[in-house]
Every structure is written in structure tokens, then in C-alpha cells.
Image (cartoon, helix red, strand yellow):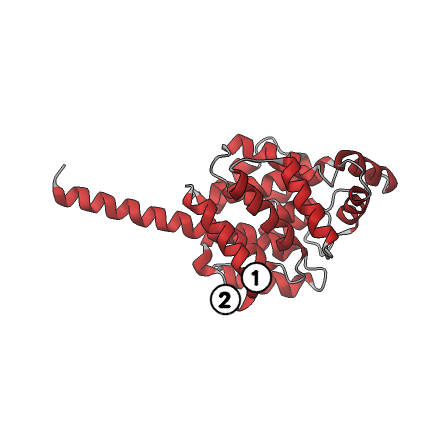
Amino acid sequence: MSENAQIRRLSVKSMEDKELKDRVAGVLAGLAAGDRNGGPIQMAVRLAESLAEMRAFDRADIACRYLSWWRDGAFDTGPVTAGVLQLAEQGIDFDEAAARVDLEMAGQTAGCNPAHRCAPLGIAPFLSDGEVGKAALLEASLTHQHPLAGDTAATVALLCRLLIRGADLGQALQRAGEGRLEEVRLALLGELSPGRGGYSPVVLGTAINFLRTSSTLADALARSIAFAGPANYCPVLVGSIGGARWGMSAVPETLLPSGTLKKRIEAAAACLARLW
């Protein structure tokens, strides 16, 4: 190989690495930009920090970080997660707490909180593609026992993984839909009616609709935020998945948090990006 050819090859690789790292950073930044109420990013950054510091998926460590946040005045967790963390604060094991809350709610625990917070799993390079989905299911079960909550979260994490690697949206949706539960599969196909509620497959399907019909992340976020109203369910997924698709450079600066939270997001994303 000639010297010029080697230089061109290194230049292309450098550009590809830069784009990949931009998409890795875009996942957390996009999630924060879409989270107008503030709870999902607080959980997601703690998950990202656990992954970055432990260099592994450590479910017990993640649970401890969530519980510490709860003791410090957690907010916007949703009723299922709030119920589990309240019991965990009393010393009840997370799995037992999740089972109790699921029973108390008559199995109505298919909400989107796990899907909101799970995206960092997709940017942890020490997890294989298969491990990303399994880790998302385990992470979701810390609070939500309904299979759809975990399956939606696993889908979101895998979508982020595929998109940061450079798959186009159509390819990522097709691959992420393999083996999914029926309602999640229909959400990816755009066959569920859009909605403003927190039922996880509908939240995912609504977010995918905005991502499919927008040419930029800024447009997708603006349209989804206007649609979602105060509950702000689908914009969080528009942000995390869209951040993986378009990258950190596409995230509107005006939608990002400031201060300590912004620094934590940037530090966790940078640490995970360096591992790719």
C-alpha cells in the first residue's frame, strides 16, 4: 500500500471514529434534550455512570444508584418506579418490591420508564448486541415486571446500538424487531395508533413515527414535544434514538440541561465513547 493510500485510509478511519463517537454522545444528550420533566435523564445518567465505572452491567450497583437518588429527592419516576423505590428504601429487595407493586397494580406495569432510562446500555461497547437486550430486560425488571416494559426497553437499547454503528433507521427497526413481543413489533412497524399516554409500546411507536417523518433531530424533537404535552412521554425516546441516529452535533443546545447534570452527562458519555 502506498503512503498516500495509507494516509487516506487513516483519514477515513478517523472520520468514521469521530462520527461513531458523536453518535455515542448523542444518545445521552438527545435523551436529555427530549426529557422536559427531568426524571428519565436522572436515571439514565446513573445507569451510564455505573456502566462507565464498573466496565460491566452490574444490576446491584445500578439498583443502589437509583435508591440513592430516591433518598436524595427523586422526581418524575412514574408510579411504578416510585412504588418500588419506596419499598426498597424500607429494606425490601428490589425483586420482591417489584413483585409487590405489580400485584398491587394488578399487572398494570407496562409503562415506559425502563425504556426511557435504558439507552446507555446501547452505548456500552463491552456488551455484545445480544447482551444489550438481555441487560435491558434485567435492568427493567428492577422496577417493572410486565414483559412489555422489558421488551420495549430492550428494543430501545438495541436500536441505539445499531444506529450508532451506522445502520439506517429502516435497517435498525427491522433488526430490532426480530423476536419481539407482538405489540412491540407492531410499534416498530408503525401499526399502533400514536398516543400521549405512558404505555410502553405506544410510546415507542409514537416516537418512531416522529423519527421516520423528520429530516433532523431538532425537527423530530420539536414536533414530538408539541404533541406530547406535559406528560412528555415520547420525546424522551425521540431524543435517545434520534441522538444515536444523528449524533451529538445534531442535538439543539437550547434543549440541554446546564450545570452539574450537563457535566455528568458529558463525562459519562465521553468515558463510554473512549471504549469504542
Q: Residue at the left extreme?
A: 2
- Side of 263 relative to 191 (left or right): left
| Residue annotated with mark 1 | 260
Instruction: Indicate the amino acid at tag 2.
Output: Glu
For the point 61% across and 44% down, which residue is it?
118
For the point 64% across and 41% down, which residue is it?
62
- Side of 109 relative to 49 (left or right): right
Residue 130 spot, x, y in % from top left:
53, 30
For the point 62% across and 34% down, which residue is it?
180
Residue 169 spot, x, y in % from top left:
49, 46
Mark 1–mark 2 Cα distance, whole angstroms, equals: 16 Å
Say which of 48 and 222 sits in front: 48
Look at the numbered disc 2 and give the secondary structure of its residue.
helix
Q: Which part of the image, by quadrant, shows the C terminus? A: top left
Residue 156 spot, x, y in % from top left:
59, 43
Look at the numbered disc 1 and give the secondary structure of its residue.
helix
Say which of 211 and 8 sits in front: 8
| Residue annotated with mark 2 | 253
In this rendering, is residue 250 above or below 161? below
First along the sequence among labels 1 and 2: 2
Residue 43 spot, x, y in % from top left:
64, 50
Mark yes or no: residue 119 visible: no
Q: How many marks?
A: 2
Instruction: Indicate the amino acid at tag 1.
Output: Thr
Mark 2 Cα shell of 10 Å, populated few (<14), some (14-19), many (≥20): few
- Side of 188 relative to 141 (left or right): left
Q: Do the residues labelled 1 and 2 touch (CB within 8 Å)?
A: no
Mark 1 Cα shell of 10 Å, populated few (<14), some (14-19), many (≥20): few
Mark toward the viewer: 1 or 2? 1
Q: Which part of the image, by quadrant, shows the N terminus? A: top left
Residue 13, quarter of the rendered image: top left
For the point 53% across and 42% down, which residue is it?
53
